[in-house]
Each structure stands twice: as structure tokens, then as C-alpha cells.
Image (cartoon, rainbow, N blue to C red):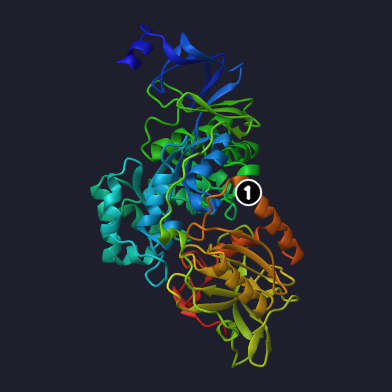
């Protein structure tokens, strides 16, 4: 066997890395020595000769980074294009949950994500969507039961069942949920959790169901409750949910091995400018965490959590995925290697994506709405002016239930700049069903409207604005471009981003997407949006009825705490 021959120095290595300071994530120290690589695997550390020599020039050699939980669809580009963005930031492995596209296109969406992530210099592993739709009352584009998921468990890159977010079904032991859990366990696969706002009793329930992770912690108390019961906690820093600084105090010398990092949902512009898991490492180090602990969390911890036992370390028997880093404080990455081959240098990918994955018509033609009228979007008031309002919390997934007085004219709600109250509309876009209306506080728009076909997790069309005409025009434009983002003012489309793949992603290069997003940013400034948070990212989570407190679906206003629909008029 070649690897044994190279390890024992009977045969020359394919590649040898010399003059590097090796980050040892097992022992929390820095060691020196050549790194011998054969057949894309590390086979030795010591003194070796190789056909190809990589001179690390005194830089640190770090294992490739692992994103423990990411919805690639949230980047708005395909998995193959996503690789061009995150690989230069040191991410060589990602565990993804394709439940965004699955909620629109079902199994065909999962197949697209698997096919498009094949044969690229990023190892993309999949956790199968457990909740399509997120709750049994939602109107998504598909419904996935255990029998639809089961065939995927044999795929070599499918690791298990993704975030179980339908806690009521789990608590009540409903058969569809139990069947999915049983299928995962029978296949000896992992199960991820989604315990947003849940207490220790819920943690007990999830652990008893063999759920072993949670990425929804927002307090130290929540994180410790999960670790104490044997869970791994994924510390999230995405585009909306930024939890790292709140959760990092939970990490100590004794429990650090139960923590890892994830982005969950992060837009392409922030991935390009901030980075991915490398951003987590820098933030953690700046907050005072030992750099080697931060790197261990981003590599070995994630690998072991997901049973990827050949990843996450620089050691014999491990994949030759590694980075060259200038210094540990800034964690400045100069080179990224995948299977011993250079794939990124100085922040730019050195590979190109040439193949085009076939797109099924089910995926490409995904917007099917009813014609929305002014009558559909009116909010009648018959008893007074008190309303139940969704109050956003900037850069958080959670919302608050605000009871406040609103402006009412001729018996219907009127948006107000002074009160910062806008109309919120959700239009079912898969079968042309209903329209839900509500009121939202905190967007700070002064005029116009915005609309999107990205609305977690059912991904119906969601829109908010200052007047009915612009809201309806924005919705109609989303239908016209077959999904995407739009900013409208006085009946004119100021900017848009077509997302032709299930209304979630585009096949365009990420550079083109960034250019469109800049135009959207400029348009948002024109209509008075705040620059303290991304309005579209915030909007995308206002239809997700599994994260507290108040959300809007196409069926109406939903109180997550009581798990029931309520009237807008209080």
C-alpha cells in the first residue's frame, strides 16, 4: 500500500510541506516537522522527501475549517459557486441542510444540491430535511415523509437527519416525526436539533430522541443546559443570528470539546467581506479565547461531532486539507489546500467551476400565486385601534409581540412613518392559495416596498411597505422574475435580483450577485431603510412559525408561544 510505503519512508511522498508550524488540535500546542502526503492523505510528520515541495515559509499549518451547519441556499448561489466563496476563507468541509429548496421542490431539490456539490474542492455533506414543511399546518411546496427521505440515507455524503424543529410533534410523539427519527436511527445516522427558546425539559425530550446537536442557543444558560445533557452546541454567527459573543462565556477548559461553529444562514456579501468560519475564529480570539481552542472548535470538534474521522487535524490518516496562516491573532489565511492541492491563494479561488447542473422544471418554475388585489392586503379594524404587531429585533431571528395603537382610516390599518409601522404580507406561491396580512414594527422604511421569495421555511412571497400599490407591485414583480428580491417605489422597480432556482438561488457567478446586491442596497437607502441590519434577511425570517414570538404566514398572524393563530386586531 502506497500510504504505508511513504509513511515508512520506503517510497517518496507525493507532496511534502516543509518549514511550517503545525497546529496540533489534539495537544493544544505547535509542533514542527515535514508533513508527508500520499494519495491525498497525510501519512507522516517528521523528515520526508516528496515529488512536490510546499514551502510554508514559517507560517502556521492549520487543518481545513468545517462549517457545522449551513443552508447554502441562503448564500443565493449554487453549491458549486458557494465553494468559490468559502474555500478562500479556509472552509474545506460544510455540513448543509437543504431544507430551503426542499420546501419548494421536495426530493428534486435535494437531488439538485447533491449533484451540484459533487466533484468540487469543498466536501459538502448533507443532513436531510426533517421538517418539510416546518409545521404540519404550513403551506410549503412539498411534504417530505420518512419514505421519501429513506433512499437518501444510502448516499455517501448524507450524514443524517437535519434540525428537528417541530417540537410539538416530537413532544406528542406524532407518527410522521417518529418515523423519520426511526429511519435515521435504523440507518445509523445522526440527528440534529432545533431547540429555539426551549427549556431543560425539552432538552431531555430531544436527547431521549437521540438528537445530539443544537444551533439555536442564545444564552449561556441554554448552552450549558444542552452540553450538560450530552449535546454538542453549535455557536452561530450568521447574517441575522449573531450569537457568538453571547455564547462564548459558556466555553471553558473542561467543556470546550462540546462546542463548534456554524454560519446557519449567511448572505453572499457578508461571506465575501467577513468570511465564514474564519470569521468565527477571529471574533473568538478577539474576545479572549485561546487561539488553539478556537481552531480546535472549528476543526476537530466539528469533525468528531459529525463522525468525519479523517478530517479536522494535521496528523497521519487524515485528509490533506490544510491552510497556511500568517499569525494566530489575526488568523490571516494566505493559502488553502484541498487533498494536498492548492485551491485558494490570498483570498481568491484558484479553481473554476465549469460544469452546469441540470435544473428540473419543477425547480426552475416555482412561483404560482393568485392575483393579489388591494382587498387581499387590507387589515380591517372594527373594535378600535389596538393591534398585535410583530416587533423585529435587529440582527436576531426572534421577534417580540407588541400590543400598540395603530392608525386606522375608514376601518382599515394605515402604515405610519412616525410609529414605524408597516404592512406585512405573505402570499402562498406554490399552489396559488391564500394571503396573510399583518403589521410589523422596526423596518424604518419611509416609502415604497420590498418583496422576496425567500421566506423561511416555506418560502412563500413576503413583502412589506408603506402603501398597498407598491406592495402589490413588488409582489407582482417577484412573480414576473420567477422569484428573487425587489425594491419598489412609486410603482417603479428600483432594483432586483432574480433567483431562478426555486426562487432561492441563481446560477450566476457570485460576482454578478454582489453587483446586483449593491444596487439593492442603494435602493434600500433611497426608501429610507436602516443600515444597522439587512432588511431582506430580517424579512426572510418573519414567516417562520417555529421561532418566537410572533410571525406571519399565508394563513395569518401566528403566536409561537401559544402555537396558535391570533387576530391582528387586539
Q: How many marks?
A: 1
Please determine whether, in this image, residue 327 is positioned above or below residue 497.
above
In the image, what residue occupies the spot 61% across and 82% down? 387
Q: Quadrant of residue 105?
A: bottom left
Quadrant housing the N terminus: top left
Question: Residue 138, position in %: x, y?
Answer: 42, 71
Of 454 and 540, nearer the camera is: 454
Please determine whether, in this image, residue 248 is positioned above or below residue 416.
above
User: For the residue labelled by badge 1, is the local secondary structure a helix, a strand or a loop?
Assistant: helix
Res 249 seen here: yes
Please determine whether, in this image, residue 150 is positioned above or below residue 52.
below
In the image, what residue occupies the spot 64% across and 40% down? 287
Question: Residue 19, position in %: x, y?
Answer: 57, 13
| Residue projecting furthest to the left | 186
In the image, what residue occupies the spot 43% across and 59% down? 363
Residue 4 as seen in the image, left or right of residue 396: left
Please determine whether, in this image, residue 399 is positioned above or below residue 438.
above
Question: Residue 402, position in %: x, y?
Answer: 61, 75
Quadrant housing the C terminus: bottom right
Mark 1: give few (<14), some (14-19) or many (20+) Cα within 10 Å. Answer: few
Q: Read off the residue under disc 1.
A: 512
Of 287 and 123, nearer the camera is: 123
Res 195 seen here: no
Question: Residue 485, position in %: x, y?
Answer: 60, 62
Residue 429 as seen in the image, left or right of residue 399: left
Amino acid at each position: 500500500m502506497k500510504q504505508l510505503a511513504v509513511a515508512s519512508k520506503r517510497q517518496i511522498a507525493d507532496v511534502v510541506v516543509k518549514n511550517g508550524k503545525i497546529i496540533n488540535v489534539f495537544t493544544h500546542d505547535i509542533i514542527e516537522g515535514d508533513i508527508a502526503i500520499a494519495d491525498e492523505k497525510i501519512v507522516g510528520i517528521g523528515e520526508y522527501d516528496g515529488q512536490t515541495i510546499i514551502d510554508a515559509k514559517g507560517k502556521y499549518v492549520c487543518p481545513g475549517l468545517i462549517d457545522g451547519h449551513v443552508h447554502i441556499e441562503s448564500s443565493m448561489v449554487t453549491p458549486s459557486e458557494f465553494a468559490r466563496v468559502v474555500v478562500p476563507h479556509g472552509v474545506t468541509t460544510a455540513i448543509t441542510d437543504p431544507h430551503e429548496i426542499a420546501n419548494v421542490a421536495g426530493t428534486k431539490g435535494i437531488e439538485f444540491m447533491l449533484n451540484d456539490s459533487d466533484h468540487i474542492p469543498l466536501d459538502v455533506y448533507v443532513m436531510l430535511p426533517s421538517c418539510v414543511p416546518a409545521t404540519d399546518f404550513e403551506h410549503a411546496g412539498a411534504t417530505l415523509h420518512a419514505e421519501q427521505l429513506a433512499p437518501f440515507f444510502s448516499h455517501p455524503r448524507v450524514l443524517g437527519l437535519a434540525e428537528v424543529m417541530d417540537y410539538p410533534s416530537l413532544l406528542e410523539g406524532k407518527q410522521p416525526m417518529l418515523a423519520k427519527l426511526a429511519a435515521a436511527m435504523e440507518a445509523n445516522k445522526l440527528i440534529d436539533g432545533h431547540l429555539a427558546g426551549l427549556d431543560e425539559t425539552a432538552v431531555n425530550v430531544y436527547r431521549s430522541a437521540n438528537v445530539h446537536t443544537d444551533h439555536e442557543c442564545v444564552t449561556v444558560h441554554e448552552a450549558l443546559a444542552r452540553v450538560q445533557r450530552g449535546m454538542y452546541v453549535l455557536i452561530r454567527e450568521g447574517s441575522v443570528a449573531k450569537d457568538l459573543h453571547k455564547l462564548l462565556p459558556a466555553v471553558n477548559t473542561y467543556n470546550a470539546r462540546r462546542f463548534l461553529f456554524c454560519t446557519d444562514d449567511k448572505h453572499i456579501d457578508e461571506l465575501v467581506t467577513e468570511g465564514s468560519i474564519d470569521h468565527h475564529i477571529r471574533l473568538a480570539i478577539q474576545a479572549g479565547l485561546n487561539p488553539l481552542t478556537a481552531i480546535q472548535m472549528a476543526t476537530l470538534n466539528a469533525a468528531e461531532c459529525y463522525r468525519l474521522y479523517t478530517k479536522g487535524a494535521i496528523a497521519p490518516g487524515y485528509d490533506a486539507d490544510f491552510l497556511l496562516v500568517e499569525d494566530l491573532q489575526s488568523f490571516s489565511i494566505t493559502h488553502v489546500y484541498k487533498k494536498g492541492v492548492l485551491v485558494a491563494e490570498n483570498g481568491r479561488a484558484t479553481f473554476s467551476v465549469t460544469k452546469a447542473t441540470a435544473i428540473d422544471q419543477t425547480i426552475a418554475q416555482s412561483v404560482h400565486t393568485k392575483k393579489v388585489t388591494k382587498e387581499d392586503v387590507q387589515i380591517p379594524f372594527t373594535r378600535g385601534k389596538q393591534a398585535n404587531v410583530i416587533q423585529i429585533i435587529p440582527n436576531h431571528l426572534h421577534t417580540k409581540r407588541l400590543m400598540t395603537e395603530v392608525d386606522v382610516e375608514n376601518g382599515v390599518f394605515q402604515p405610519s412613518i412616525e410609529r414605524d409601522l408597516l404592512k406585512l404580507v405573505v402570499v402562498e406561491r406554490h399552489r396559488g392559495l391564500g394571503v396573510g396580512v399583518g403589521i410589523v414594527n422596526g423596518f424604518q422604511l419611509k416609502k415604497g416596498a420590498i418583496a422576496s421569495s425567500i421566506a423561511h421555511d416555506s418560502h412563500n412571497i413576503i413583502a412589506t411597505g408603506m402603501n398597498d400599490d407598491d406592495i402589490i407591485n413588488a409582489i407582482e414583480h417577484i412573480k414576473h422574475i420567477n422569484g428573487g428580491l425587489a425594491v419598489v417605489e412609486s410603482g417603479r422597480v428600483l432594483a432586483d435580483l432574480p433567483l431562478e432556482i426555486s426562487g432561492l438561488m441563481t446560477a450566476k457567478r457570485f460576482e454578478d450577485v454582489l453587483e446586483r446586491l449593491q444596487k439593492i442596497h442603494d435602493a434600500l437607502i433611497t426608501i429610507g431603510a436602516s443600515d444597522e441590519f439587512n432588511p431582506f434577511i430580517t424579512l426572510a425570517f418573519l414567516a417562520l412559525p417555529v421561532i418566537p414570538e410572533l410571525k406571519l404566514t399565508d394563513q395569518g398572524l401566528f403566536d409561537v408561544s401559544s402555537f396558535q393563530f391570533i387576530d391582528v386586531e387586539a
